[in-house]
Amino acid sequence: MTEKFEGAAFVGARKLDNGGVVFDCINEKTALWVRGEETMKEFIAALGGTCVFKPRTLGIVVKMMPVELDIGSAGVLRLIERESGLKAGVIVTARWLKPLHRRMEGQRVAHAVVELVNAEAANHLIDNGVFTQGKFCKARKPVAEVQRCLKCQKFDGHFVQACKSTVDVCCRCAGNHRTSDCTILDSGMGRRTVPAHSF
């Protein structure tokens, strides 16, 4: 049985469009306690059914990380936390921003998306950078893209579900195929510098 946490409480719950439920805790200490492995097991068991726990995270972009890093490995994530001055367990997941098959031949570094448990950890990396294997990597908030239809690439306010176009348009080369099927590799041209801002 999990040890009780004095003062722990939920202040609200919201149902999401996808069927999920967001539970709002009274404070961060309660949230951290609920996220604990044993507490969460008991919490899910009490809810019953096929419930799964998905922690809310904040994503940041870490620039120019060495591609030989296995960022899907928990061991690598713990190493990054230690070298970057973070508490153990604050990095939930990490993934490469661009699909592996889009990399140029001989590419040594790439951008990654790192998901963290709270704004404090995210801001720490944005302010101080990420250290891994002796390399310093800058971090920034993700840039919100202008919403567009992913089928025809128009910015007129409609989305794929309502698109009347009979053909797909690639956002990479403007050809009549899906972007995921495009064979053109990124050239690295047209990159822009984005300022780092805290959450």
Image: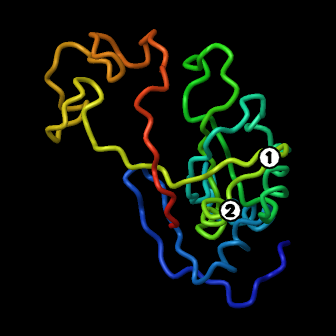
Q: Which residue is rendered at x = 56% and y = 35% of the image?
A: 97
Towards the viewer: 21 or 148: 148
The location of residue 57, given as percent across then percent down, is 58, 58
Look at the picture and state if 124 lies above or below 102. Answer: below
| Residue 185 relative to residue 77: left or right | left
Looking at this view, name the residue that lies furthest to the bottom: 7
**Do callouts 2 and 1 mark residues in contact (Cβ within 8 Å)?**
no
- Residue 85: quadrant of the picture: bottom right
Image location (x, y in percent) of residue 3: 84, 79
Q: Left of 86 or right of it: where is 109?
A: left
Which residue is tagged 2?
128
Give the position of the N terminus as an image quadrant.
bottom right
Of the numbered discs in the image, which one, if any, rests on residue 132?
1
Relative placement, left or right, of 56 versus 159 is right
Q: State the separation of the CA atoms marked 2 and 1.
A: 13 Å
In front: 9, or 115? 115
Residue at position x 18%, y 32% in the image: 162
Front position in the image: 172 or 163: 172
Return the residue nearer the eye: 107 or 72. Answer: 107
Q: Secondary structure at mark 1?
A: strand
- Name the element at disc 2: helix
Q: Position of residue 36 (x, y in %)?
A: 77, 66
Q: What amino acid is labelled 2 in the image?
A: Asn
